[in-house]
Image: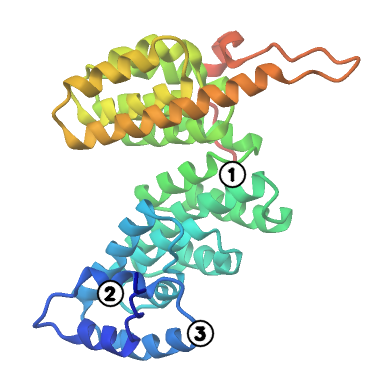
Amino acid sequence: MEIPKPIPLTNLITALLDESTPFHPRFLNRLSDLEPVDTALFAEAWPKVSLRRREALLEDFEEIHLADDLLSFEAVARLGLKDKEPSVRTRAIRILREYELVDLLPAFLDMSEHDPDIDVRAGAAAALATYIYMGEVDDLSPSKLMRVEECLLRLVSNETNTRIQRNALEALGFSSRKKVNDLINKAYTSNNVDWLISALIAMGRSANSRWKPQVLKMFIHPHPGVRAEAASAAGELEIRTAKPMLLELLEDSDLDVRMAAIWSLSQVGSTGVRKALEKLLESTDDDEEADQIKNALENLDFTNEMRDLALLEIPEDGDDADESSDDDYVETDDDLISEDVED
């Protein structure tokens, strides 16, 4: 079988600049993993590409990366990060945050506080979640982690735009700083649905079982966005006692809630989950929901395998196996009290 020849970059650029002809999808993969010489050539043409096509190109990259993370569109996205148009910068941020590029941290920090566009600042604040997580798993130096945390804390406390504040709080969800718990609790008890949703996102990212009671209480909230994030948080925190409630959410009238419950059940696992998901797969006529169920069934296999391996682990001599779990957590009144945020 003859291997197809690579598309010359000059041909691709010509097609990209030609607004009279649709840009063929076969050109997209050619822009993955560009060599330095090709990057330089493409950079010369980038300002000449129409705004509509620059935006569409980055949107396509984002979708392709979700389907195939072996393809890297970092080089083109870096061009977009410096684009004069905020809509392009925002899309570039969403792509680049997935690559965990430490050299871009200063740019994201600066953009989160100083970019003239609100959407760009909000996107940069959200992107900083990647670096908080990297710091928590020792993939980022403590000094850099502290810079990110301090930036996000400033945004939560001093920013006037609520969306930027909320994105900053959600990013801080990965942080183990004690002060973050106060911020999450304040958002949770704010009587504001948007802040409640952000609090639940942060709780799910925290890997902290202290939030179990608060998460479970939101399963019956009247707002579907809250129910969806509560379901997601239960999965992220692997709250096994949430299984009956998650099974009930499979019949929720809101698709987003059902989608969240489907995936969380694959994270929680336990008896009856596979049967419930397979039953839902047979009855659904929604393609998106069906795809989510199929992916969840695959993830359920992984969850069960990891749990079986954990059961086979033998504790070292002199040590007792840790039998505690988030299911043993006892709710106290202090967990539900909102404390003032420190200056």
Percent of width and height locating residue 293: 30, 29
Q: Residues within 10 Å of mark 3 (few under 14, many from 20)?
A: few
- Secondary structure state at the residue bearing disc 2: helix
Using the rendered image of the protein, determine whether residue 7 is visible from the camera's viewpoint: yes
Residue drawn where x is 36% and y is 74% of the image: 3
Q: Nearer the viewer, residue 173 or 195?
A: 173
Kindly tell me whether residue 193 is visible in this rendering: no
Rendering quarter of residue 254: top left
Residue at the front extreme, as displayed = 1
Which disc, if any, is residue 343? 1
Residue 263: assigned label: none
Residue lying farthest left? 20
Q: Is residue 237 above or below residue 158?
A: above
Q: Which residue is mark 2?
A: 27
CA separation, marks 2 and 1? 51 Å
Q: Nearer the viewer, mark 2 or mark 1?
A: 2
Q: Amino acid at mark 2?
A: Phe
Q: Which of these two is toward me, 104 or 288? A: 288
Q: Nearer the viewer, mark 2 or mark 3?
A: 2
Location of residue 24 by image quarter: bottom left
Q: Earlier in the sequence, mark 2 or mark 1?
A: 2
Question: In terms of secondary structure, where does tag 3 sit?
Answer: helix
Left or right relative to 175: residue 155: left
> Would you say 2 lies left or right of 127 here?
left
Image coordinates of residue 123 in percent, x first then y, are 39, 57
Please name the residue that numbered disc 3 is placed on.
Answer: 36
Specify the quadrant of the image occupied by residue 273.
top left
What residue is drawn where x is 33% and y is 29%? 260
User: What secondary structure is marked by label 1?
Assistant: loop
